[in-house]
Image (spheres, helix red, strand yellow):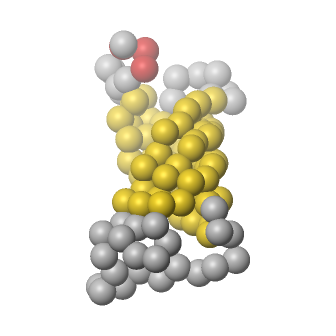
């Protein structure tokens, strides 16, 4: 496994992602616990010796939604993992706050 460190001398690096995400409400009620999952195709574009690397990714998240009149306010923690060519692996964790309005689309 290679480790890629990003510092202030690194040139522009872009990560392009195309994927699908789903949401599951295990309690089947408005608000409360939810799980989010996803799969993706990824392209890492670098200006350096790595060039462009392709790979696949996955996403797993867990959160809690507070329902209001017309929307839900959701807090989520998630982990994303991407496996790229040349044994390069990207793993990120991220907290997020979202606004859910699925019932009103």
- Give the camera-side residue of 70 and 45: 45
On screen, 102 above or below 41?
Answer: above
Q: Residue 103, percent across and down?
A: 43, 15
Image position, residue 54 (x, y; %): 56, 54
Q: Is residue 58 left or right of residue 30?
A: right
In this rendering, position of residue 70 left or right of residue 43: left
Front residue of 46/23: it is 46
| Residue 84 x, y percent position in the rendering | 61, 60
Question: Can residue 32 be seen by looking at this rendering?
Answer: no
Query: Residue 6 or 104: which is nearer the viewer?
Result: 6
What residue sits 57% from the left and 42% below the top? 40
At 69% from the left and 30% from the top, the residue drawn is 26
- Relative placement, left or right, of 96 versus 89 is left
User: Vertical placement of 30 versus 41: above or below?
Assistant: above
Is 3 rendered above or below residue 88?
below
Residue at figure coordinates x 38%, y 48% from the top left:
97
How many marks on residues? 0
Residue 43: % across, % down: 49, 52
Residue 2, above or below 76:
below
Picture quarter with the C terminus: top left
Residue at x-position 63% and y-position 29%: 24
Of residues 64 and 95, the one nearer the viewer is: 95
Q: Quadrant of residue 85?
A: bottom right
- On-image quarter of the N terminus: bottom right
């Amino acid at each position: 496994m290679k480790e890629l460190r990003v510092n202030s001398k690194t040139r522009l690096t872009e990560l392009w992602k195309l994927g699908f995400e789903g949401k599951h409400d295990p309690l089947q009620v408005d608000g409360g616990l939810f799980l989010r999952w996803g799969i993706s195709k990824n392209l890492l574009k670098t200006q350096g010796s790595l060039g462009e690397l392709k790979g696949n990714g996955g996403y797993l998240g867990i959160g809690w939604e507070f329902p209001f009149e017309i929307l839900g306010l959701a807090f989520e923690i998630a982990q994303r993992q991407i496996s790229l060519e040349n044994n390069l692996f990207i793993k990120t964790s991220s907290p997020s706050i979202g606004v859910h309005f699925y019932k009103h689309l």
